[in-house]
Amino acid sequence: MSEIFAFAGKGGVGKTTVSGMLIRYLMEKRTGGPLLAVDADPNANLNEVLGVGSYATIGEAREMMKEAVPAGMTKETWMELKVHESLVESKGFDLLVMGRPEGQGCYCAANSLVKKHIEVLRENYAYVVVDNEAGMEHMSRLVTQDVDHLFVVSDATSRGLMTAKRILELAGELKLHIGKAHVLINRVRPGREEEAGRLAAQRGIGENDIIHDDPSLFDMDAEGGSIFSLNESAALLDAYAIFDKNLKK
């Protein structure tokens, strides 16, 4: 059975970058088998963090399904084929992108398709890392509701930490099957650790971990690099220490 990791949090807090850090960590530290990265955010950019170029999306396939299913083939069979065709094979991991549908409306259908097929695909992987949509209104549509580790990412702001607290509360209300939840406070400036901890406590968040602000991440984005191009990165070292502590076998 695969081990499932999911990420959630307010937009703009670095959730996707931390997702990429975990993917790199699992590739370097674990030898249990293949890894599937799932970008379940309609505003897809996990591919950029991972250094993946072109890709197809489930949203695009769903739009094509309205007219492209050949005679004699069911829509379900055609969609299953397209999901497998959408898998991007990279060195050390595969990537599946939900994307946004071309038509108007919500992303419920595309998300449901990802959820349905991920349950089949996960049997082929030791690890599945899911970067979910920002915010909390879509928590009920987590790609998989059987999560071993849920990482809720925030920045050191009152609004970000309040969103993190609400995500944890909503996960409980929805009775999602989560093995363990972790709050990561990202982009904390050196010397402001205690302040971040106090702010988290004020918002009802007890246990949390800190990833320091790191200019090398800005440089990575500006230069179009990937998470694998980072060398001397304080944020990456922080993340690895957090994963070492919380993901012990």
Image (cartoon, helix red, strand yellow):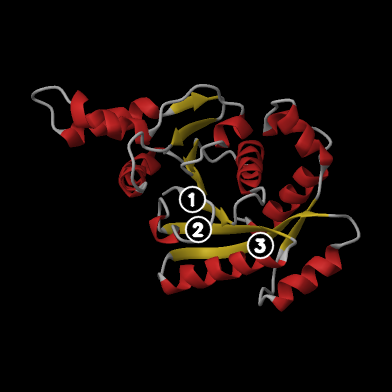
Residue under circle 2? 148
Task: Inspect the image, locate mark 2, and give the three-letter code of the amino acid beneath it.
Answer: Asp
| Depth check, front residue: 188 or 84 | 188
Q: Please provide percent x and percent y for residue 242.
A: 71, 55
Q: CA distance from mark 3 to mark 1?
A: 27 Å
The numbered mark, 2 or 3, whose residue comes first in the sequence reads 2
- Image height of 57 relative to 143, above or below: above
The numbered mark, 2 or 1, whose residue comes first in the sequence reads 1
State yes or no: discs 3 and 1 in contact (Cβ < 8 Å).
Answer: no
The numbered mark, 3 or 1, whose residue comes first in the sequence reads 1
State yes or no: discs 2 and 3 in contact (Cβ < 8 Å).
Answer: no
Task: Inspect the image, locate mark 3, and give the three-letter code of the amino acid beneath it.
Answer: Gly
Q: Residues within 10 Å of mark 1 (few under 14, many from 20)?
A: some
As helix, strand or loop, the secondary structure at mark 3 comes to helix
Q: Nearer the viewer, mark 3 or mark 1?
A: 3
The tag on residue 3 is 1
| Depth check, front residue: 28 or 205 | 205
Q: CA distance from mark 2 to mark 1?
A: 6 Å
Q: What residue do we see at 62% from left, 40% from top? A: 20
Q: Residues within 10 Å of mark 3 (few under 14, many from 20)?
A: many
Q: Quadrant of the C terminus?
A: bottom right
Q: What residue do we see at 50% from left, 49% from top? A: 132
Task: Inspect the image, locate mark 1, and give the three-letter code of the amino acid beneath it.
Answer: Glu
State yes or no: discs 2 and 1 in contact (Cβ < 8 Å).
Answer: yes
View extreme (right): residue: 191
As helix, strand or loop, the secondary structure at mark 1 comes to strand
Residue under circle 3? 160
As helix, strand or loop, the secondary structure at mark 2 comes to strand
Q: Please provide percent x and percent y for residue 94.
A: 48, 31
Q: Please provide percent x and percent y for residue 165.
A: 60, 70
